[in-house]
Amino acid sequence: MTISSGSTEEMFRPPLNRGMQLLDRSLFKKTILISAAKVVDRKRIKDFRTTLNHDLLRLDRFQTVQNILEPNGEQSKALLLNQSIYPSDDIMCSILPEDEHDNIPTGFSVVGHVVHLNLRSEHLPYKHLIATLLLDKVPSARSIINKIDDVGSGNAFRTFNYELLAGDPDLNVEVNEEGCLFTFDYSKVYWNSRLNTEHRRIVQQFKPGEAICDVMAGVGPFALPAGRKRCWVMANDLNPASFDSLAGGIQRNKVQNFVKAHKEDGNSFVRSSTMQLLNEDVEIDVTPSRPRHSRDDAASKLVKKQVMRRPRVFSHYVLNLPASALTFLPSFVGVYAGYERLFSPHTDTELPLVHVYCFNTKSDNVEEVEHDICREISQQIGHDMHPESEGEKEGSVSIWDVRDVAPNKRMFCASFRLPEKVAYGHF
């Protein structure tokens, strides 16, 4: 069997013979090695075609069932198989030692054209073999890399050191998520495709017209989809590469009316963005434009102008820096001091929700983990906080289990409404 790095369509394209003036049929002959499943019992060809339906070779004007010549000169029937019939884990089983089969490295992340591995030490002797296999088997793959240290171990920007195992060294990628196009250098910013569901969960809590403060925005997985919902977003990241990609993404996804990029320390940004929102009046015209083909000028003049005004206060703060985000919480103490009359009971506006990410121990004792997170939040903001499950509304924290990040480590999102004493500094 020959495995090609190209698609099936590329394999079967005719050879290039440009400049030909008289047709020479011999120049269009091409030999391709492919896989086939021999059918011993011809009466069962129909059954096998049904069973192997998704694994058969599909080409226009070409029969899936073909005659093959046996070594003894007799003819048999065979079903032609797609070139990717063998899954990568099956091939790994065939090339790795038997004592490694219980821990085959089948887990990896795909970010644009980059396949990101996190190989165990026992698999490192086979790293280039594994990379070559994945370069062939993953349709979008052009670069195979292996992480060689922990995320953020060398800097505060959550990047990591890596080695290129196979393919193109260029890690500038394009990723589509939630209807937004993100472009960035994967070696310089943080991105985790496995957090797509978590990004969606948080953005679904935002309502159109609300103001959102994204304190550690990265390249904008929360900010850009929120902007598409017509939420006003102040998005911040101290990493210059993240800031540049965020700013470019705002323009590329046409959310510049609603999303603004900032490059500031997260602690100061909590304060500065809150004050900016309080002291600036911003509105935009969102009147639907008249269709280009419309000639009814009189009717267009009757369309009432529609304006959206940015709120004076944030409805949500997002702090997505799990390794240290809890340490940024003291910035919220007194953040709305002197502005008590903007909130309930003086108005219908509630104090904002804070969504802060953190790491904790992977444990079957859920209550112990939740209390541990709440104790840390309490220490940081100087106010007693408790798990939502205990029933009390004041100081209640909803804790969402996001995902595993290591054998004994999990990522959580703690969401709570900013207590009055904390927001106003009334202790």
Image (spheres, grey):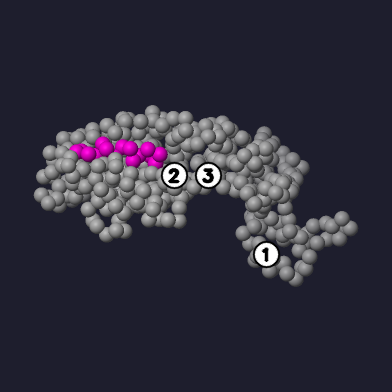
Residue at the image point whose x is 67% and y is 39% from the top:
126
Q: Position of residue 298 (x, y in %)?
A: 16, 49
Q: Which mark is residue 49?
A: 1
Residue 322 among those drawn in magenta = yes
Please state which of the two labelled residues, at mark 2 or mark 1, is closer to the viewer.
2
Relative to 386, residue 5 above or below: above
- Left or right of 398 in this view: 23: right
- Left or right of 34 in this view: 196: left
Q: In the depicted view, which residue is nearer to us: 169 or 163?
A: 163
Confirm whether residue 208 shows in the render.
Answer: no
| Residue ID for mark 3 | 109
Whichever of labels 1 and 3 marks the residue nearer the N terminus, that label is 1
Stretch of the chain drawn in magenta: 321-335
Q: Give the quadrant of the C terminus.
A: top left
- Residue reaching furthest bottom? 43
Q: CA distance from mark 2 to mark 1?
A: 36 Å
Residue at the image point whose x is 37% and y is 44% from the top:
357
Q: Position of residue 219 (x, y in %)?
A: 39, 37
Mark 2, Cα crowd under 10 Å, few <14 / some 14-19 / many 20+, is few
Determine the secondary structure under disc 2: strand
Residue at the image point whose x is 23% and y is 34% from the top:
271
Marks 2/1 in contact by CB < 8 Å: the verdict is no
Whichever of labels 3 and 2 marks the residue nearer the N terminus, that label is 3
Q: Position of residue 423 (x, y in %)?
A: 20, 42
Amino acid carrying mark 1 in the image: Arg
Mark 3, Cα crowd under 10 Å, few <14 / some 14-19 / many 20+, is few
Q: CA distance from mark 3 to mark 2?
A: 15 Å
| Residue ID for mark 2 | 176
Confirm whether residue 60 shows in the render.
Answer: yes
Amino acid carrying mark 3 in the image: Ser
Amino acid carrying mark 2 in the image: Asn
